[in-house]
Image (tube, rainbow, N blue to C red):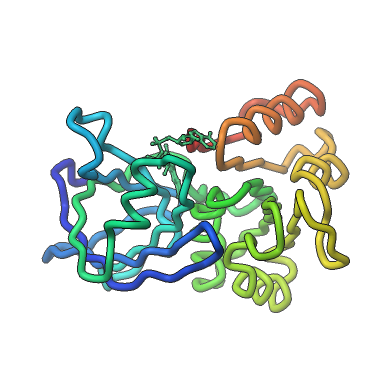
Amino acid sequence: MPRNWIEAKVITIIDESPTVKRFILHVESEEIFTFTPGQFVTFDLPVGDKRLDRWRSYSIASTPSEDNMFELCIVLLDDGKGSGYFFTEVFVGTILKFKGPDGSFVLPQETEPLYVLVCTGTGVAPFRSMIKHAYEHGLPYRFHLIFGCRTKEDILYFEEFQKISEEQPLTLRYDVVLSRETSDAFYHGYVHQVYEKAYTSENSTVVFFLCGWSKMIDEARNNLIETMGFRESQVLFELYG
Ligand SMILES: Cc1cc2nc3c(=O)[nH]c(=O)nc-3n(C[C@H](O)[C@H](O)[C@H](O)COP(=O)(O)OP(=O)(O)OC[C@H]3O[C@@H](n4cnc5c(N)ncnc54)[C@H](O)[C@@H]3O)c2cc1C
């Protein structure tokens, strides 16, 4: 894994929801940039003087390819310096400095367990990479994606996940939970109700992957391990902040 800073040029920016943009970048180097689905990269952004003030990590939302492109899915936080920089200072053609890939929150080799992927908002990014990778390569994984957000317009990558789950229902079971809107098509409330109803700790081959902000992760870990009795080794997580 290269530890030096690498340059990437922004090629495309897509408005995915009112508060989330997708950034597609091209790595400007001769070497092929590769990663494992689930990993993240860290940018040095001109938003502070000290090293740690400037660094922001983002999960890679796309799949490994040989074209040196990768995608990020970033939410604009209120008063967020890093996300604010991406939303106001980054344009097609902007060159950004990053390092990576890093992280061990990756799609395991083992295809036997059922992987229950629980996320809110842009926490879906590593799961999009994992699911799309398995789908594109016809790998025999089984996923249950439980995605939480506020309203229908906040749902990320909806058509893609819908298509995969319709074409290959054994590969992907897809549930969306809206916290601030009711709809016949989706659950209403929070992500926890879905896995609480679907699984018990007798399902010894279930592995949970949790991704997002601390409130959801803390609640889910507590529910799964303390209340429902799953082993710690069955509950993996990536904390955004
Ligand atoms: C491994 C890893 C992967 C990540 N991947 C992604 C990703 O794919 N997409 C993505 O959007 N982000 C991701 N993040 C989060 C990202 O690194 C930044 O933390 C995020 O963009 C906020 O940075 P900021 O500079 O905008 O906010 P900062 O300036 O650092 O924070 C200030 C503001 O953020 C808000 N804030 C701080 N913590 C929280 C919280 N827990 N919940 C809600 N608001 C909060 C506060 O309201 C505050 O006003 C990832 C983080 C890690 C560690």
Tell whether 128 sits left or right of 149.
left
Tell whether 220 sits left or right of 140.
right
Q: On the image, which quarter does residue 237 sit in?
A: top right
Q: On the image, which quarter does residue 24 sit in?
A: bottom left
| Residue depicted at x 43% and y 64% | 22
| Residue depicted at x 35% and y 41% | 81
Residue 9, horizontal then vertical, whole percent: 21, 65
Q: Nearer the viewer, residue 238 or 76?
A: 76
Give the total number of marks visible in the rendering.
Answer: 0
| Residue depicted at x 70% and y 33% | 220
Tell whether 214 sits left or right of 165.
left
| Residue depicted at x 15% and y 46% | 5
Ligand 1: quadrant of the figure: top left
Residue 83, horizontal then vertical, whole percent: 39, 48
Q: Nearer the viewer, residue 55 or 201?
A: 55
Point out the image quarter for the N terminus.
Answer: top left
Residue 183, horizontal then vertical, whole percent: 84, 64
Q: On the image, which quarter does residue 153 sit in?
A: bottom right
Q: Nearer the viewer, residue 182 or 132?
A: 182
Residue 171, horizontal then vertical, whole percent: 67, 65
Tell whether 31 sits left or right of 77.
left
47 is higher (above) or lower (below) than 232 = below
